[in-house]
Image (spheres, rainbow, N blue to C red):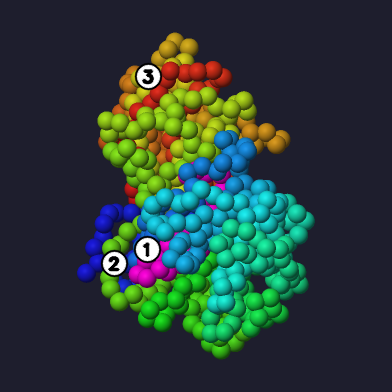
Amino acid sequence: METKTESNTWQPDLGDGIFQNPIIHADYSDPDVIRVGDDFFMVSSSFSHMPGLPILHSKDLVNWKIVNHVIERLELPGYDKPQHGKGVWAPSIRYHNNKFWVYFSTPDEGIFMSTTKDPFGRWEPLHRLKEVKGWIDPCPFWDDDGQAYLVNAFAYSRCGRKHILNLSKMSADGKNLLDDGQIIYDGTLKHPTLEGPKFYKRNGYYYIFAPAGGVETGWQTILRSKSVFGPYEDKIVLHQGDTEINGPHQGGWVELDSGESWFVHFQDKGVYGRIVHLQPVKWVDDWPLMGQRIDSDGKGEPVKLWKKPDIGKSCLIENPQTSDEFESDQLGLQWQWQANPNSQWYSLSESHLRLFAHSIPDEGTLYEAPHLLMQKFPAELFTATSKITYDSLSANDRTGLIIFGESYSYISIEKNEQENFVLSQYVGEWKDDRLVEKKIIQTEVPVASLYLRVRVHNYGVCIFSYSINGLDFYIFGDEFIANEGKWVGAKVGIFAAHLTQGTSEGYTDFDWFRIDS
């Protein structure tokens, strides 16, 4: 019998042997997935948010938990500050020679890898295979004869090339490219914006699963050949069709002991980011056909409801973590900073989180502040609430609850000129290529502790509120419509910041952070 572990805002497992898409209603973009025995592991892009390269684990492809991150920091110049839209792009995960391997690119610095024997434990320090600009979306492949390869796409914004896939020979230890590779497929005419390749071999064919057509409007392309360097045939196997699931593509294929095949991919859902879907796959004439209502050309449409994967047993119903009681000596794995973390930003003790009010960068807004602590939107509709105690704030400190994207809004506590605490709402928006922050409303609060809340409605409509007793909440400030960030969905989180340069002795204690439906 399946047991539900906790209430959550989005539930893909319906508890009756049926699942609904998406399997994760959160921004785990560019997912890749593998099966190792009875376990499934997923990895996704994390850009410059740290810790990076999240590892998710499942027993049935439907119920997932965050179990680790490959990297705590990205030890490259500039990443101690936010690098919006840069950082970790489109990773691949593989299991080879009794080890787990993750490959990814940063669009400006090159191709990197890490490996481990224990995906729940420590991953080896990053190793750079190639220092190069614009080589993106790498995926390794070890052939039956021991020869290793790496396939990649290109970012036009960095190197002036796109629509094409490149295949290089790689050393067997996975750490060095042996050549600059050769173009194995040009999708300019039939599959523009071809990218995100994943390499497989099945029944004598080499396969490359690759999305095309663009993130919001694209489709899933399959390339196959009897030779590793081609020529490759092509077929579109998944598209939006008559469904509401736009741009269904880019992900990973797994095959079960039962013989079933499944494909994990994303859908770009604007403010909610690139959410994760699961499609059934059947093989016909050595082509993988995905989803439902497959037409005579092999194009399938995404499913909304489907029978769960046949793994021969039932599993706990669970979801990626959201709420945090701050009772551990470690932050929950759902939290990420905007840049490489600094241990001086926070402490965990006495069952609460203390955020110290560090200075924001010279730009003067929270958009460039590395020490925002945030997590992904977990559903279309949800409520985030935190209890905070702020009597140790100093002058020019500000602390509170934030909704963050290309623009942002937050409610915060600070001191006015009379040294009294005031609750305010701020909005940061772009004006003439410059982000400008403005105050919407302000009121004095005669207490040193408050409950702050934001309710997120459909399409990212956000309404802030506060409470003195935790029971009676009062709407505060203007409605704010959240928007996505640079290649990422909107985030919700907490912060403490010093608004001028110099040192602050101030801090805020967060008793807990809870997300509910």
What is the x, y in percent for residue 430? 64, 37
Q: Residue at x 34, y 26 (%)?
A: 389
**Magenta region:** 29-51
Q: Earlier in the sequence, mark 2 or mark 1?
A: 1
Alpha-carbon span between mark 2 and mark 3 = 46 Å
| In the rendered image, the vertical position of residue 246 relative to residue 341, given as above or below | below
Mark 1: amino acid: Ser
Residue 354: x and y in percent read: 37, 29
> Closer to us: mark 1 or mark 3?
1
- Residue indicated by mark 3: 392
Provide the secondary structure element on which disc 2 rests.
loop
Which residue is more in the foreground, 133 or 376? 133
Q: CA distance from mark 2 to mark 1?
A: 9 Å
Labelled disc at residue 463: none
Query: Magenta stretch containing residue 37, yes or no?
Result: yes
- Report whether 70 appears left or right of 88: left
- The residue pinned by badge 2 equals 315
Residue type highlighted by circle 2:
Cys
Q: Residue at x 62, y 59 (%)?
A: 176
| Furthest residue in direction bottom, as rendered | 285
Which residue in the protein does label 1 denote?
Answer: 58
**Of pointers 2 and 3, the one earlier in the residue sequence:** 2
